[in-house]
Amino acid sequence: MFIGIDIGGSSIKGAVISSGGDWLHFTSTATAKTKDVIVDDILSLISILVKSQNATLSDITATGIGSAGSLDRDTGTIISIPNIPALSDFPLSSRISERTGSPVYLENDAKVAVEAEMWKGNGSRYTNWILLTLGTGIGGGAIIDGKLYTGQHGSAAEFGHTTIKFDGINCPCGSTGCLEQYASAAAVVRMTREHLKLHPDSTLNTSAQSGKLDAEMIYIEAMRGDGCASEVMQMTGSYLGIGIANLVNIFNPEAVIIGGGLSGAYELLLPVIRETVHQRALPGMREDIDYHVISEPTKAPAFGAAHIAMKYTHNSK
């Protein structure tokens, strides 16, 4: 069996697949703040997944881990991860491998989402396509001629750290005006807090004052017609459209697929994204693009990480 772990800014997900590629079990936990606790939590998830199959650690063939940030796949090291700084410059693969006794393969979190979508989702229908994962931050992946493009060290397609405002908001990555500062789940919450002062009658004020405001709550209220939430989702769609238009001009994709927690707002975001891409992308590239939401947005990346572990294992034989 193969284990998959997906590390996000808000939660860590785990999945197990059979040697034949069947999806078997899924579980998750909140993301901790320190690396030792994160490692312990990953090991706890692995233990839960193994026990779900009445198996032991010795039955694990390999584990795949998807992580945000820039990575060195060859050494299994997370180089920099702005949304989980405790894991920066950390050899995660070796730390997990020494406890499980089996190989651990590290990959970018958006790439494991791409892997799942290419394997069992809408991406299987196309040869050239891109995916954006909208979570605490924004990740991405590109399929070129049917193959995942990973770059020199496996960190290619950091779409969330492309600049859409040269003099914009400071980003934890060290740059300014990054897409994820305007169109991630965290950005949606920040922009809502900024705009609530203009909307004293918004249903979101109570949640904001209690500290329980989150992106899902905001897009649900937007669907119900809340003025503040609707404005924020409109802005988010416009910013995403700008970022995607840039990617369309670079990759000329057949399809754009949206994943991550904010993909729940897909119906709200898509019309604005389409309109903005049509306004900003080049003629001849902006036409004939299919748009989709990722299949199983919560679970798919973890299963994709397990599938990557399976592929690496087979390729090494």
Image: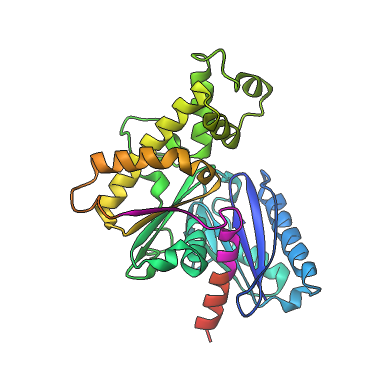
Q: Quadrant of residue 310?
A: bottom right
Task: Name the outermost residue toward the front.
Answer: 224
Compared across the picture, whether 291 is left or right of 197 comes to left
In magenta stretch: residue 118 = no
Residue at horizontal 51 percent and vertical 46 percent from the top:
263
Q: Image height check: is 278 above or below 13?
A: above
* Residue under the image location 70 percent in, 74 percent down: 101
Q: Give the range drawn in magenta.
A: 289-306
* Residue 28 visible in the snapshot: yes
| Residue 203 screen position, x and y as percent | 60, 21
Where is residue 43, by image quadrant?
Answer: bottom right
Q: Is residue 93 left or right of residue 137?
A: right
Q: Which of 111 and 303 is in front in this view?
A: 303
Quarter of the rendering occupied by the N terminus: bottom right
Horizontal and vertical percent position of residue 191:
48, 27
The reply to whether residue 170 is visible in this rendering is no
Q: Which residue is drawn at 57% across and 34% down?
A: 220
User: Residue 282 location in percent, x, y?
Assistant: 20, 47
- Is 36 on the left-hand or right-hand side of 110? right
In the rendered image, the vertical position of residue 230 relative to residue 184, given as above or below: above
Residue 61 locus on image (x, y percent): 66, 78
Tell me which residue sits at (18%, 49%) in the image: 283
